[in-house]
Structures are given as structure tokens and as C-alpha cells.
Image: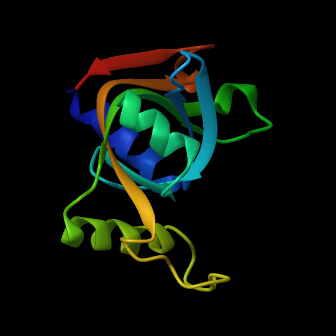
Amino acid sequence: MDRDLEAKILDILDRHRIMTIATLRPDGWPQATTVGYASVGLTLYFLCALDSQKAANLAHDDRVSLTIDHDTPDLMAITGLSMAARAEAVTDRAEAETALQLMPAKYPATTTLPMPMPGPDEVRIFRLTPVVISVLDYAKGFGHSDTVTV
């Protein structure tokens, strides 16, 4: 992958905290949901309730699509990511605890959580490994995107 494009992807991942993730329901319909995320390099983590529809969907089919973006009043300042990725439940306790520590670190130090972060046994934590990444950057032209296979 081109170093400049990878740097752009990592910058977008670092600057944002939420994404829309689409999973596939057993009946074939996609389900899009907004979730918080943390990342290490190109690997993303998110968590959900143990009995959530997302967790059930991912148990059936590990393919996801996701977007990360933000609203801007300047049409030509639109940037974002779209990814196709594989989701895998995190079962290693050390990795799960690390992922849980990364989540609140995405917020300013002055932010206090309304409750303690859940433990690894209280939530399902997923690792997302990108397969295809599209980088949307209108500064390069209306609707411009660069796509890479990882």
C-alpha cells in the first residue's frame, strides 16, 4: 500500500470515534448500526452486548462493511473511509482487555464515563480486519476515492 494513502487512512481512524457497521442478518438483509471503535494500525475493535443482533449476525456471517466519516459544511472537504472487513470475536483475554482500554482513550481526558467500562466477560468484543479500503477525499476532486486491497 502507498505510504501516503496508508497515512491518510490511519489519520482518519485516529481522528474519529464512531463508525457505521453493516452486518448481514440470517434472512439476508443488511443491518447498519452506529458503534464506537478503537484501532491499532488498520485493525479496528468494537464491542456490543452479548445477545445483540450484531453478535448474532456475525456468528452467522463474519463479513462486514463499515464507514467512518464526519459532517462538514464544505462540500469539497468531505473525507471518509469505507471498508469491507472480516469480523472475529476476540477470545484472548489480554487482547480483550487492551481493546477495552483503547475505547475510552479515544475521548478527551476530561470526559467521564457514566459507568465503568464493562469487563471482557460482560460484552462481546470484535476485531475487524480490513480486506478492501476505500478512501474518500473530495479535496482531490468531487467524489474522488482511492481503493486498496489489504
Hey, which quadrant is residue 53 in on the image? top right
106 in relation to 83, above or below: below
116 in relation to 8, above or below: below
Is 146 situated left or right of 30 in this image?
left
**In the rendered view, how is the structure colored?**
rainbow
3 in relation to 131, above or below: below
- Name the residue at 39% across, 70% down: 100
Q: Position of residue 110 (x, y in %)?
A: 62, 86
- Name the residue at 56% across, 71% down: 107
Which residue, as the protein is rendered here, is positioned at the far right?
A: 73
Q: Position of residue 3 (x, y in %)?
A: 22, 35
Hey, which quadrant is residue 91 in on the image? bottom left
Whether residue 36 is visible, yes or no, is yes
Is 57 situated left or right of 8 in this image?
right
Whether residue 19 is visible, yes or no, is no
- Viewer-proximal residue, 89 or 26? 26
Hey, which quadrant is residue 125 in on the image? bottom left
- Viewer-proximal residue, 77 or 28? 28
Is 48 situated left or right of 69 in this image?
left
Q: Position of residue 93 (x, y in %)?
A: 22, 70
- Viewer-proximal residue, 113 or 12? 113
Q: Position of residue 85 (x, y in %)?
A: 35, 30
The quadrant in which the C terminus is found is top left
